[in-house]
Amino acid sequence: MISVGIDVSKEKSTVFAADENGEVLMRVCEFEHTEAGMAELIRRLKQLPEEPRVVVENTGYYHWPVVNSLLAADIFVCIVNSIVMSKFAKVQIRPGKTDRLDAMLICRFGLANWSNLVRCCPDEERRTLLRLYSREYSHAVHMVVDQKIHFTSLLDKTMPGIKTLLEDKGGRSKLSDFALEFWHFDRISKQEPEAFAKRYCAWAKKKGYHANESKATAIHTLSQNGIPTLPCTDAVKQLVQEAARVLKRLEESVNTILAQMNELASTFPEYKVVTEMKGVGEHTAARLIAEIGDVRLFHSAKALPAYAGIDAPPYQSGEFESHRRKISKRGNKYLRKVGYEIMSALMSTKPSEDNAVYLFMCRKKAEGKHYLSAYMAGLNKFLHIYYARVLEVLKEPV
């Protein structure tokens, strides 16, 4: 057995190789992330007395130039979760943190877990890209929420109460579009009701909204009764309109990311069976596949809830055993979030078919469990079902 540990950084990789007897076959050396550097690394690995197993810690995306080069050369590569590697490092007698020590640690991990090393799948890079889309989507959604709070705060100062009359529907930014045209109540209240209604209906038709005269009358009445706390000046106009433009741009970015993520997710073999699961829509399916990745890398169905951080580790000492355990939350928070959304959708739709998870949550709530506890219990069951169904689709060995 020859294990090769590679510690990957942004521009270079530190490599160390040894066999099961502890004999050093490749002393610590560095290879640049260039074509020449990767060619030299492959040449050195091919010169080893037997086929090695290369172990790489997951760095997000820095490891992919190395992994892709090795896979192209038909070299066994295993990508290890950083949490798993961190736990392995903590049990070492002499801890330390340098590129050299990390490469040696990763090599020892490979030897200690030789039979459990799983060869990296050819489509793993696409799965990593899908996960990047999922994380970017989550980040963009947070930005939209923050900007929407800022934007509505400004509107409360120029058009208090307008949000109650204009709601965004079907992904359309009606409130933002309205603020770009009518950004202050003074611009509305100084017009005659009929004149404003005519102008409002013309604006609505131009933007593709329903031209509702009664809505225009309600807005005009609100403008006469409302008391803005910011003056109707050019500076305030610029602030409100720019906030509206930023919000619209962010919402467009979210839609673009979502479309690209869905398109990529649809190319994976498990996409169809995942979208057929109750509570899962097109968007949540893409994020679910992105965050879980290849289920064949999990040793059992129980490992999936643990990866999501919704397992409840036992707590027992002597004769004491706790019966009020909490989920660990030591896992993928993005997977927990999309799982929560799916459980919420299940409780809203109340499916009559394929409803084992829904009925399980109902039973937990009937037992007096808090709805969050019921949701997490349901998600645990859902992930077991997901594992079984997707594994059936991906039954070809890794």
Image (spheres, rainbow, N blue to C red):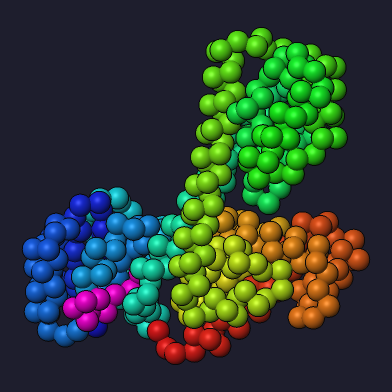
In the picture, measured across the screen, residue 57 lies left or right of residue 223, that is left
Can you say which quadrant of the picture contains the C terminus? bottom left
Front residue of 74/167: it is 167
Seen from the viewer's position, the closer of residues 118 and 5 is 118
Q: In the image, 224: left or right of 50?
A: right
Given residues 30 and 21, the one toward you in this image is 30
Q: State the image quarter where residue 23 is shown.
A: bottom left
Residue 138 placed where, x, y %? 54, 50
Number of dots carrying numbers: 0
The answer, for residue 173, to whether it is visible in the render is no
Q: Is residue 361 magenta?
A: no
> Measured along the vertical axis of the image, is residue 135 above or below residue 124?
above
Q: Is residue 383 above or below residue 257?
A: below
Residue 281, given in percent of the width and then of the height, sits at 65, 67
Determine the residue positioned at 74% across, 44% down.
210
| Region rendered in magenta | 71-79
Residue at 45%, 63% (x, y): give it. Answer: 130
Which percent across, then down, holds residue 260? 47, 60
Please tell me in which quadrant of the rendered image residue 174 appears: top right
Task: Check the picture and name the quadrant holding the N terminus.
Answer: bottom left
Describe residue 125's horizontal placement relative to residue 328 as left or right. left
Q: Nearer the viewer, residue 89 or 348?
A: 348
Q: Would you say residue 128 is visible in this rendering?
A: yes
Q: Does the magenta stretch include residue 76?
A: yes
Q: Residue at x 57, y 79 (%)?
A: 272
Residue 66 picture location, percent across and down: 23, 65
Q: Residue, x 71% and y 28% (percent of image)?
A: 199
